Image (spheres, grey):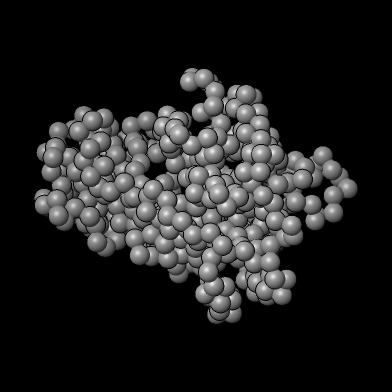
Amino acid sequence: MAVIRPFKAFRPCADLIEKIPALPYDVMSSEEAREMVKGNEYSFLHVDKAEIDLPVGTDLYSDEVYAKAAENLNRMIENGNFVQDEKPCLYIYAQVFNGRRQVGIVGCASIDDYLNNVIKKHEKTRADKEADRIRHVDACDANTGPIFLCYRNTDKLDLIIESIIADTPEFDFVTDDKVRHSIWKIADEQIINAIVGEFDNIPFVYIADGHHRSASAVRVGQMRREANPDYTGEEEFNFFLAVYFRVDELMIMDYNRLIADTNGLTTKELLEKLSEKFDVTAIDRADRKPKVSHTFGMYIDNQWYKLVAKEGTFDENDPIGCLDVSILQNNVISPIFDIHDPRTDKRIDFVGGIRGLDELEKRCSEDMKLAFAMYPTTMEELMNIADADMIMPPKSTWFEPKLLSGLFIHKLS
């Protein structure tokens, strides 16, 4: 059964609640981060992307970057920018974006739940990305960005959450991207025990977003266990920072594809090849966004086309093969464009749906030749694949809104 554990969080002091929190480190480049922190010495990007405080061109994976991250975090704590709660608590973190609300419980997950697959995964991780976050967590001695988990909701847990958020939040603010963030602290031991008890009845939780961060947090915990063979299992390094959301409040956005060239084909030849596996129709811009699964928008030469997968081009009974990202990869991206590993091939790029389809048109006028607009993967598809211990294709899901880093810090010692 799933573990959720209260902890003594370091949190921004009230005066800095709108200055410290920042978007996750992996949704921006170093150059973008340098621009974002201008005029804000308190931004958590000084911790999560500490290269911005070093000379331009510094190796992102140099010892200096991780040392600077730890230095910045420790200085902010020593200066009182963060305040630690006196006793272990759970917290409620609600976000409202475009009129849609998602409410999560902030606590610590168990590294053993991760290792024993109580925490289910759906994505492969890359060794280089894991190594980066392992060094960051180890140097900072802290989990600085929460893992985005989800669970199949229960009536009792829903009632507990709704009773808490009926009260005035401790913090309530809106970020530049128009997302409203609200925080409630749960210090009452009776309520904490009730929440923990409800998770005792939840057999599995799922990683929605944060596979690299969770894998890295677990590896650091294992390293600490190896260094402390007499560990009891209660030490903080046995747990990592997470936010648990009920699945029915979450929304996956489209994760669109850009291709750098047509692999030597003329547009006419490309359309003819596509017609073998898809019904292809030229459409107006107003109809460019796919409205149902197994339907794609394609943009090339300033024209949008609608592609509908023909019967027999995929196996509806294959939980991975029937995903739209698989249909496109197996019938188009691999056989037509010779892009067989989308994780590493430089001829393909990916754009989260939050940027909109205008971004696809823009990129096609700058550095790419054509684009594919996707219909979003569903939460049910994600959980079915995770339950089957299978792995989704790369870049299958894009969650919005993102969880802010710097709202909660979990120290490992």
Seen as rendered, the residue at the extreme front is 15
Residue at x-position 64% and y-position 59%: 107
Left or right, 98 with reference to 23: left
- The answer to whether residue 18 is left or right of residue 134 is left
> Residue at position x 67%, y 49% from top?
83
Q: Quadrant of residue 127?
A: top right
Q: Quadrant of the C terminus?
A: top right
Residue 342 coordinates in the image, percent (x, y): 40, 39
- 220 up-or-down from 254: above or below: above
Query: Measuring 29% from the left and 61% from the top, which residue is drawn there?
Result: 293
> Could you say which is closer to the camera, residue 17 or residue 95?
17
Q: Residue at x 42, y 51 (%)?
A: 175
Percent coordinates x, y for residue 23 in the rendering: 47, 45
Q: Is residue 263 visible?
A: no
Asked if one can make out residue 356 in the rendered structure from this viewpoint, the answer is yes
Residue 367: horizontal and vertical position, in percent?
Answer: 26, 30
In the rendered view, tell whether residue 268 sits above or below residue 204.
above
Quarter of the picture holding the N terminus: bottom right
Considering depth in this image, is 387 or 145 the residue closer to the camera?
Answer: 145
